[in-house]
């Protein structure tokens, strides 16, 4: 077997085994704080191995507020927003508090109100349609990374 063919076969085998595991830790492009590996956590902005170990030791997080309580003692508001752009505890569209919704980077009081106004959400398409009245598709997709219908 030629080297290129062997490489292609090995790469396909790796993707079949490793990629689903790696992606299981992500909700869209945002890591789930309850499942991210130590290495993934430590690679995030403002995070180091000590803080990654603290996150792992405090699991499971019932909400983003629990994660925020842990990280807020080590990180300032700007740093937290940087971390939450890449790491989050997904919030339920139908039951999240305004305080939880406001933890989503870039969401202010007006958008939090819009999230709450259209409850209950029966499916993610409804979320896309309703929030899409206020922001473009790209922003809806970004916001969707932080939410679940659970």
Image (cartoon, rainbow, N blue to C red):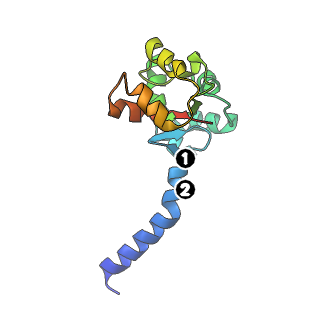
Q: Is residue 10 left or right of residue 150?
A: left
User: Decide: marks 1, 2 in contact (CB < 8 A)?
Assistant: yes
Q: Examine the image and state in which quarter residue 137 appears.
A: top left
Tell which of 140 and 25 is nearer to you: 140
Label 2 crowd (10 A; few <14 / some 14-19 / many >=20): few
Element assignment for label 1? loop
Farthest residue toward the top?
109
On the question of residue 102 being in view, the answer is no
Element assignment for label 2? helix
Farthest residue toward the bottom?
1
Total marks placed:
2
Query: Which quarter of the figure is the C terminus placed in?
Result: top right
Query: Which quarter of the figure is the N terminus placed in?
Result: bottom left
Q: Return the mark for residue 108.
A: none
Residue 61, horizontal then vertical, whole percent: 66, 32
On the question of residue 56 being in view, the answer is yes
Look at 33% across and 34% down and name the residue there. 138
Tell which of 36 and 73 is nearer to you: 36
Look at 65% across and 25% down and name the residue there. 66
As measured in the structure, the alpha-carbon distance from the residue carrying label 1 to the one carrying label 2 is 7 Å
| Depicted 71 relative to depicted 38: above or below | above
Look at 63% across and 34% down and name the residue there. 54
Tell which of 87 and 97 is nearer to you: 97
Residue 32, horizontal then vertical, whole percent: 56, 39
Mark 2 highlights which residue? Answer: 21
Residue 103, horizontal then vertical, whole percent: 52, 22
Tell which of 25 and 28 is nearer to you: 28
């Amino acid at each position: 077997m030629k080297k290129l063919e062997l490489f292609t076969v090995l790469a396909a085998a790796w993707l079949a085994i490793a990629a689903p595991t790696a992606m299981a830790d992500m909700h869209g492009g945002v890591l789930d704080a309850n499942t991210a590996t130590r290495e993934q956590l430590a690679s995030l902005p403002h995070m180091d191995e000590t803080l990654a170990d603290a996150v792992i030791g405090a699991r499971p997080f019932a909400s983003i507020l629990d994660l925020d309580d842990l990280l807020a003692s080590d990180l300032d508001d700007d740093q937290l927003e940087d971390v939450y752009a890449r790491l989050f505890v997904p919030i339920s569209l139908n039951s999240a508090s305004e305080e939880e919704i406001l933890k989503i980077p870039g969401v202010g009081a007006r958008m939090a109100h819009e999230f709450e106004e259209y409850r209950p959400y029966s499916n993610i398409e409804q979320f896309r349609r309703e929030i899409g009245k206020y922001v473009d598709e790209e922003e809806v997709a970004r916001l969707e990374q932080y939410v679940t219908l659970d």
